[in-house]
Amino acid sequence: MRISSLPAYLSACLPALLLAFSFPAYSPPALADGLPDLGDAGQVLLSPQMERRIGESVVREMRLRDPEFVDDPELTEYINVLGNRLVANSQDVRQDFEFFLVRDSTMNAFAMPGGFIGVHTGLIVAAQSESELAAVLAHEIAHVTQRHMARMVSKDGQLSMAMMAAMAVALLSRNTQLGSAAAVLGQSAAITAQIGFTRDFEREADRLGFLTLEKSQFDVRAMPEFFLRLQKAGRLYENNAPAYLRTHPVTTERIADAQNRIQGLGYRQKPDSMDFQLVRAKLRAEQGAARDTLAQLQGDFKDKKYSNETAARFGLAVALLRSKDNARAEAELAPLVKSTEHPMIAGLAARIKQAKGDNLGAAETIKLALVRYPNNRALNHAYVEALQQQERHAEAAALLDEQIRNYPRTAQLYALRAKSYASMGKRLLQHQSQAEAYVLQGSLPAAIEQLQLAQKSGDGDFYQLSSVDARLRSLRQQMETERKEAKEGKPGM
């Protein structure tokens, strides 16, 4: 099978991924006690900056091509807050991390070069505690800080470029068709052998992930408990094991190691945060067919099949809103609005008002919530949209400037700012903002076209035009470099 026959976003990713697996990478010289030497740390051929560029290129393509890439501000904020809490207690806090979600019902998570970690929504739904989810993230963080993906193919240098590309596709693919493509592109026996080789890396990630989990004040027993559930699931579904097992083989030895680490530690029960409970309830309400999910949640709530009543009621309200039963959704949420202060509850109350056509009420609800949670990413995003619906674009643009300073890699914010500038008649700023949205979405030609329109807008001052000109030159150079890399079949750094 030729590379061009693979799905579009994976084909576009392969040049960067080939680079990721083509160079020995730096890893910290100090090894965890009792772990094998998994690679030569002395040959620094792949810099952290190069790894970051590789990861950025892959995530851009996923964001552009993969319809299951999650851009929900509430969900994105939660996974990044949780992830960065763990990063702060990991072995390399100098590394920048970005966590993102993929709407997929399977239990899986994956790490990519440069600190990008993807999490399937199915993992959050299936996790029986927040500590279990944290255990998986801590493990993936260790894969990044220890540069496992680069070291995996640099030890003996005997893998071909095709095999490396196949491994990359196998790690990112989420269905059997792509898995088959990976096997054809490379050699299935070699891929299997290489995944077997990574068991040492799994042990290292387990060890360091355990330390991160403990320092972050989570329940460390969650790690062996999660492994045991995965192993049981693998035995029950031999031909359809959880996706996490295919890229993270769980062995009896790994389970025993995890169990041994908790021996002698004091018992620490870590209650799940309300954030985790509500995010999990929201994801559950959004999966499957709307009617079927609503019926299931209604039945569970009636029979009191829940661990947290607040989260169960919240999820039911989400499912009712999804089914366009706005009046019942509002009635279901009303007790929580009175009894529980939380940004996600306020956000849902506002979305229900918007669905009922009460845009002014929605804006007021969000504004009041922002007094208590001024830095909440999702609430600020929702308030921008509410302001735009009321044609208050100057206020929206000012708030967007602040949000972009805080979250400069969020394409949605630039697109929203472009919308406000368009309504204000500021054509240069409109096209300039839309260009940045396209850059983050991975579409350089569209970004360049927007900057060309900005040049011709006729309403910019000298400094604004100079900024547009400089950015246009930079993007043209970047696009030319990428064209050369694609033509040569490998990226040049």
Image (spheres, rainbow, N blue to C red):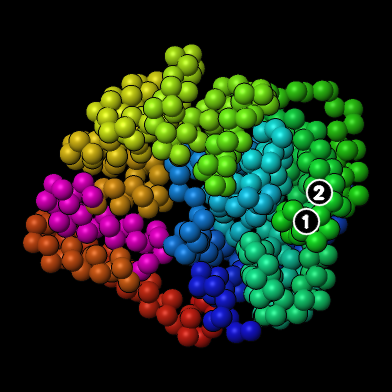
Q: Amino acid at mark 1?
A: Ala
Q: Is residue 368 above or below residue 420?
A: above
Q: Extreme top residue here?
A: 339
Query: Is-magenta flag for residue 431?
Result: yes
- Horizontal side of 192 relative to 368 (left or right) equals right
Say few, some or many: other residues with alpha carbon within 10 Å of mark 2 (under 14 / 14 to 19 / 20 or more).
some
Do tag 1 and tag 2 residues touch (Cβ < 8 Å)? Answer: yes
Q: Position of residue 136 (x, y in %)?
A: 70, 44
- Look at the image and give the residue range highlighted in magenta: 419-444
Say few, some or many: other residues with alpha carbon within 10 Å of mark 1 (under 14 / 14 to 19 / 20 or more).
some
Q: Secondary structure at mark 1?
A: loop
Is residue 418 visible in the rendered structure shown here? yes
- Horizontal side of 431 relative to 96 (left or right) equals left
Q: State the residue in front, 349 or 101.
A: 349
Prevailing secondary structure of the magenta residues: helix
Is residue 375 visible in the rendered structure shown here? no
Q: Residue at x 50, y 73 (%)?
A: 8
Q: Amino acid at mark 2?
A: Ala
Q: Which residue is mark 2?
A: 233
Q: Position of residue 477 (x, y in %)?
A: 35, 74
Q: Residue at x 60, y 21 (%)?
A: 309
Residue 40 circle label:
none
Q: Secondary structure at mark 2?
A: helix
- N-term mark: 1 or 2: 2
Q: Position of residue 430 (x, y in %)?
A: 20, 54
Q: Quadrant of residue 435?
A: bottom left
Query: Is-magenta flag for residue 160?
Result: no
Q: Residue at x 32, y 58 (%)?
A: 436
Q: Extreme left residue here?
A: 458
The N terminus, quarter of image:
bottom right
Q: Which residue is mark 1?
A: 241
